[in-house]
Image (cartoon, rainbow, N blue to C red):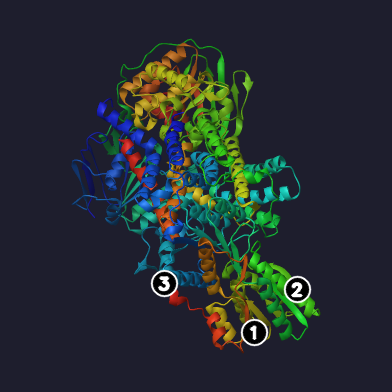
Amino acid sequence: MSDPSRFNRRRVGRLLNAIGPVFGLALVIGLFSLSPAVRAHFFTGVNCKIILLQTVIVAIGALGMTMIIISGGIDLSVGSVVALTSVVGATSLVKGYAPVTAIALTIAVAGGIGLINGLIIAGFRMMPFIVTLGMMGVARGTAKWLADNQTVNAPKSCVNNLMDMLDPLHFFPLPLGIWITMALAVVMAVVMQRTIFGRYIFAIGSNEATARLCGIRVGPMKVAIYALAGLLFGLAGLMQMSRLTQGDPTVAIGLELDIIAAVVIGGASLNGGTGSISGSIIGALIMAVLRSGSSQMNWPNFVQEIIIGIVIILAVGLDKFRQRKAAF
Amino acid sequence: MVGVRKSFGATHALKNVSFEVGPGEVHALIGENGAGKSTLMKVLSGAYQADTGQIELDGERFVPKDPLHARRSGIAMIYQELSLAPHLSVEENVLLGEEPHRFGWLNRPRRRTVAREALAELHHENISLDAPVSRLTIAEQQIVEIARALIGSPKVLIMDEPTSSLTQVDAENLFTVIDRLRQRDVSIVYISHFLEECQRVAARYTVLRDGESVGAGGMASARLNDIIRLMVGREIQDIYPRTSHALGKPVLELQALRGVAKPRSANLILHEGEILGIAGLIGTGRTETLRACFGLDRIKSGSVWVGSRESTHSSPTRRLAEGIGLLSENRKEEGLLLNRTLADNLTLTRYGPVSKLGLVNRHRQRQCAQDWLARLEVRAQSPEQAVSELSGGNQQKIAVGRLLHHNARIFLLDEPTRGIDVGSKVQIYKLLDELAAQGKAVVFVSSYLPELLGVCDTIGVMCRGVLSAVRPAREWNEHTLMAAAIGQWQAATS
Amino acid sequence: MKSLLRLLPVFVLLSVAGCGRQSEGTGSTPGARSYTIAVIPKGTTHEFWKSIHAGAVKAERELNEKGVKTEIIWKGPLKEDDRDQQIQVVENFMSRRVSGIVLAPLDSQALVKPVENAIQAKVPVVIIDSDVKSDQYVSFVATDNYKGGRLAGERLGQLLAGKGNVILLRYAVGSASTEAREIGFLDALKSKYPEIKLISSDQRSGPTRETAYQASQNLLNRFGNEVDGIFCPCEPPTIAMTKALRDIGKAGGKVKMVGFDSGSQSVLDLKNGDVQGLVVQNPVLMGYLGVMTMVKHLQGEKVAKRIDTGVVLATPENMEQPEIKELLRPPIDKYLTE
């Protein structure tokens, strides 16, 4: 029990847990710097900016998804919600709403979908997997219906600048979307780590029965979690719209899987109770770096897909290994 | 078939057990909770290996390697908790694991005949082969379970508390089935707390206590009181702080509380400064009484009074706000957040003192947890450690610590000392005594009679879902408690 | 706070890298005369894109033979028809500082910003196949799709002798090339054959044969008994619609079918008489001219802003003529040996 060597091993284990994803990211970056031809372009400011820019949508989605996965749930409707909100945003701009109104409306719609998800999951005690799988179809269909099966071209507005590269030759200035993502990541990390709300989310994911026993109102908490995550997914949809400069009902198919992968690579367990915002953000970065790197290496698309698949399995496998070590 | 003879000498759970069953004989295995019955069963069924001693089957040495081997050799088992697959049909359940097949292809017509014959043998052809098991009554499910056991034509059938969840009538039916099996020369080991039942079905008995067989004999000639004495037969040790507490005004009252299945009727009045013990066998509804009272399970009828206010239908959130805390009997599955830190577990229900405006002050939280760890003498390295890294006793102290941190006035403790070391037990007894001295009220559910007698001011006994007749602890002794728990009220009052 | 600290090294790493070496542009130094050109199709599985690929490779070989060192990088979006993925491909090539990008944009609006960003970053862009709503690109090398659409309209009108019910199964929204064909087709009917009635023109096939097949079946379920002629503006719906016609026994001329683009299946359908007209582009030439135009631009020559690669109507009657035959069966294998 009080054997010092065991104590140290436990600390080492925890340290490993903490730096695991960072180490993974460093490894991936290191891997691509091996090739001199790639190195020349990989470590340029512009490339870093582009990687960050390509991470934004997955990262914002991962902020919400981390919360949901830590609470022991899952949300498969993200991709469809992103498509729907991009359509809602573009349509409201087309209809002549002020950009602020359009942004508020867009995010509110996604928050509403999250709220509905949460109400069904908590109210009928249904499996989140099933509920959000259904919502995935509902949101995608609604998006196509609203957009009349076409893309909706939004008129130029400040919304379009969110994801604009601004200066394609230099690292700074960074697009607003990147700053927003970083700020939100900080806020969400504080929420998860430091607030009672965050502690309750961990408690519910760790053991729902205990949470109930300890007087946590599990149902309302779940509703709040899915609704809050929905707001974040709405923001991701807004970013998607800004990036395409249009609302596209067919965009982001399978995005939810990228997001879940980022969260899992970041050390979260699909059983709930573990995970971190920082880990998920790094997970999202790892995937973006892999994509960018393999593109620069001239690897064909299928190689990229295979590699990312392997990375997911490796990340989760390593995590299990670390946990087993930590348990002794 | 010659007799079946088994004798063991495993170390802790089983020290020295021997008994034998003849063909077509029903042998009752009697003992308190924790006397070693379930371990013995597991050895017999091959789940555990015996350290020493031997089992003989049909006069030959038999070493069960695993449950499948035991089953193939003719030892079948019916567990207390039914182990059927609820979504599968009766037919599929009866044949589970023994499907008649040819090269992996199921033989459908043959399946039906085999399953139908098995049910017919029990005179229960009325059970539809295609119905999913979840639609059957508990009694019918039990028949299905027995039918499944009979598929392999077992020589020995072990039944563990088969009547614990049955009504009187269904129990009678089961006894008829047992008689029928006996006529087929199946040997039956019948494990039960209920002595009446044992008298009804068994020819001979063996009493287990602390992993030893302490007595055996013919059922017909046995006196119930003797058997009870054999079951208990223990000295009350001096590890209990025997101080008497001054009882104040009533703080919690249950009136004819009835839950969905259990309890059927629970009555008690808890006073300030009182430690009220609830004795009874496992599965009689003690846990359910506490859960219903705490707002975790639905209440069908009856009422709960907190102080002088009626507050029957409630939620854990509200109960905690009223100053009531529940310690779950299952600390791993319900009591604790195993992969979270000690600090989080201790402060989960009351973040107030360690937070401001919804933001948790990590330093204050750690300090607060550190204080509790010291007060409860928890052996841990740091408040940031995960609960799962602690031993059982220390885990339990964390769970109790949470109630203390919550400043609860009323403690509902469900088996607080189960599975923890003696040292921790003594600490918990001391703690309960202190709490009562401070005027707090405790409901203490336990299956271990000596601790109830040693710690409690008053004790009530729950039997088959009914809790009544709470009496001062000094009016009880282990003998009378046990008698009351198994429904022998005459013996209990004599 | 610990968790945030963990992120710190990442940002530091990225920003250090960012402030460090700036773009230095290797491939495009004019003296070296060595070019790396990225060719980005809309997708990679259709035969049409394989023909473009073949044309690009043909250009690469010829240039290298002439001593102009050229390397073609062929890369489509990770998921076909995903605009965001195509944007990512463009961005990655831009940051990789290739000499130039030859792009077939998936969307006329969504790709504007990435194209303009690349041009701003001094990576010139030649657009092929479909237009993009920008005027900063070097050149637009494509079929005159409107002309192609007119050709199809005239053929269908002639086949129906000026009267009957016609269906137009559109492709997808935002694809400028197919939209131009659709407009050309409708214009030709309106001006030359005003008696022909259009009974459906609002359905879209979607990007794959599977989605197109479903759309075709739905259309024929509804209009199967009234329809006399059908036009589909590109390969997937042409093949799918012909198959759907065969399913209900209306192929082989009972319902006149005019399609667009040549693939091995649609050529077979043409040969069997299930398709009465196929407007064919010259994708090999498009890929070839796309790369050639880019290299000319890089070498400092002035190039035309709009280059037409031509369209031809193939019919069961003329399909054996050698010049048509080469368009119907582009010599892909000669260039793509992988």
Image point (53%, 64%), residue name: C294
Q: Report the amino acid beneath label 2.
A: Asp
Closer mark to the observer between disc 3 and disc 1:
3
Instruction: Provide the chain ID for the residue under circle 2.
Output: C
Which of the marked residues, 2 or 1, is nearer the chain's N terminus? Answer: 2
Q: Report the amino acid beneath label 3.
A: Glu
What residue would you read off at disc 1? C276
The residues tagged by marks 3 and 1 sit, at their Cα atoms, a distance apart of 41 Å
Instruction: Provide the chain ID for the residue under circle 1.
Output: C
Q: Secondary structure at mark 3?
A: helix
What residue would you read off at disc 3? C65
Residue C23: x, y in percent?
Answer: 46, 47
Q: Depth check: B192 or C70 in front?
A: C70
Instruction: Provide the chain ID for the residue under circle 3.
Output: C
- Labels 3 & 2 near each other (Cβ < 8 A): no
Residue B22: x, y in percent?
Answer: 26, 49
C139 above or below C254?
above
Q: Secondary structure at mark 1?
A: loop
What residue would you read off at disc 2? C187
Residue C199: x, y in percent?
Answer: 76, 74
B370 above or below C192?
above
Q: Secondary structure at mark 2?
A: helix
Closer mark to the observer between disc 3 and disc 2:
3
Within 10 Å of the Cα at label 2, are there few (<14), some (14-19), or many (20+) other Cα atoms? some
Within 10 Å of the Cα at label 1, are there few (<14), some (14-19), or many (20+) other Cα atoms? many
| Residue B380 tag number | none
Residue B69, by quadrant, is bottom left
The residues tagged by marks 3 and 2 sit, at their Cα atoms, a distance apart of 45 Å
C260 above or below B160?
below
Q: Are marks 3 and 2 on the same chain?
A: yes
Q: Can residue B121 be seen at all in this image of the molecule? A: no
